[in-house]
Image (tube, rainbow, N blue to C red):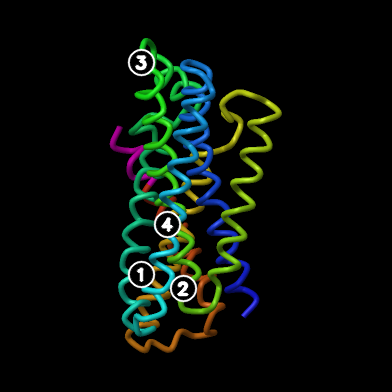
């Protein structure tokens, strides 16, 4: 269904956009503070490990029964989405600080000051690997089961290209990206996907089939907005 394809691509794109922006901030801090050689070496090593991880996971996914895979991924995706949504609600309510890429960049530069090249390169490696693992998980979660791994991967790749192009041009942290708003939206979408997959795994007949994703997402959005109001009232 077209609605399912578009939702998968959009979810992968937006979620990956957030993770790639955060990874870019770390790599940029390493490059500016300790030199571009350790930054690029660390980034390359992180991407190499991610490539191996994807190569290992691919065949394993094909060997798992569809229903079992939908249930496990659905549960993980729901928990993952709810974690993003919880933090987004608390940020929107002012209970925890908004994420600031400029501040994150300054913090990374302070931590990197005086570190030798190898140590700085490991920071870039860890940043790329950790954020990349989240991207891989999201792509697998939203693309598995309906033959949408290719579409979800394209969404993630488009996010990476967009961030890298913007970073190359601006050569500074991408603080203009509305990261907190994106996390709110992605939390809603991933939670809806998780609920959908869990239902599919136990044979639930969703009204409207794939179109049921829309009312699910609206339900999570409405609940999150209420959560923001409740959290604001408790400040």
> Going from the N terminus, do you reach mark 1 or mark 3 first?
1
Label 1 and label 3: CA atoms lie apart by: 40 Å
Q: Nearer the viewer, mark 1 or mark 4?
A: 4
Residue 27 position within the rendered picture, expressed as x and y whole percent measured from the top left: 49, 30
Q: Residues within 10 Å of mark 2 (few under 14, many from 20)?
A: many
Contact, CB < 8 Å: mark 2 with mark 1? Answer: yes
Q: Is residue 172 above or below residue 72?
A: above
Q: Is residue 164 above or below residue 26?
A: below
Label 3 and label 2: CA atoms lie apart by: 41 Å
Label 3 and label 4: CA atoms lie apart by: 29 Å
Q: Which mark is residue 73?
A: 1
> Going from the N terminus, do you reach mark 2 or mark 1 first?
1
> Going from the N terminus, do you reach mark 1 or mark 4 first?
4
Q: Which residue is mark 4?
A: 52
Q: Which residue is mark 2?
A: 144
Would you identify the image quadrant in which residue 119 lies?
Answer: top left
Residue 49 position within the rendered picture, expressed as x and y whole percent measured from the top left: 41, 49
Residue at image coords 39%, 32%: 94
Range of residues picked out in magenta: 228-235
Secondary structure, mark 1, is helix
Q: Residues within 10 Å of mark 4 (few under 14, many from 20)?
A: few
* Magenta segment includes 45: no
> Going from the N terminus, do you reach mark 3 or mark 4 first?
4
> Going from the N terminus, do you reach mark 4 or mark 2 first?
4
Q: Nearer the viewer, mark 1 or mark 3?
A: 3
Residue at image coords 48%, 37%: 43
Q: Which mark is residue 136?
A: none
Residue at image coords 49%, 28%: 39
């Amino acid at each position: 269904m077209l609605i399912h394809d578009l939702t998968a691509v959009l979810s992968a794109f937006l979620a990956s956009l957030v993770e790639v922006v955060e990874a870019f901030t770390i790599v940029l801090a390493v490059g500016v503070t300790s030199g571009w050689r350790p930054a690029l070496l660390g980034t390359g090593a992180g991407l190499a490990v991610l490539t191996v991880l994807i190569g290992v996971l691919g065949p394993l996914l094909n060997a798992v029964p569809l229903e079992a895979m939908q249930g496990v991924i659905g549960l993980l995706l729901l928990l993952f989405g709810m974690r993003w949504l919880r933090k987004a609600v608390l940020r929107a309510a002012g209970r925890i600080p908004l994420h600031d890429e400029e501040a994150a960049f300054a913090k990374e530069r302070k931590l990197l000051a005086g570190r030798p090249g190898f140590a700085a390169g490991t920071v870039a490696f860890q940043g790329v690997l950790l954020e990349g693992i989240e991207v891989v998980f999201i792509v697998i979660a939203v693309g598995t089961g309906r033959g949408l791994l290719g579409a979800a991967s394209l969404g993630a790749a488009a996010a990476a290209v967009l961030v890298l192009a913007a970073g190359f041009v601006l050569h500074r942290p991408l603080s203009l990206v509305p990261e907190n708003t994106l996390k709110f939206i992605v939390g809603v979408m991933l939670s809806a996907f998780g609920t959908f997959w869990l239902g599919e795994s136990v044979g639930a007949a969703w009204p409207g089939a794939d179109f049921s994703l829309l009312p699910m997402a609206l339900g999570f959005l409405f609940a999150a907005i209420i959560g923001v109001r409740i959290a604001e009232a408790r400040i």
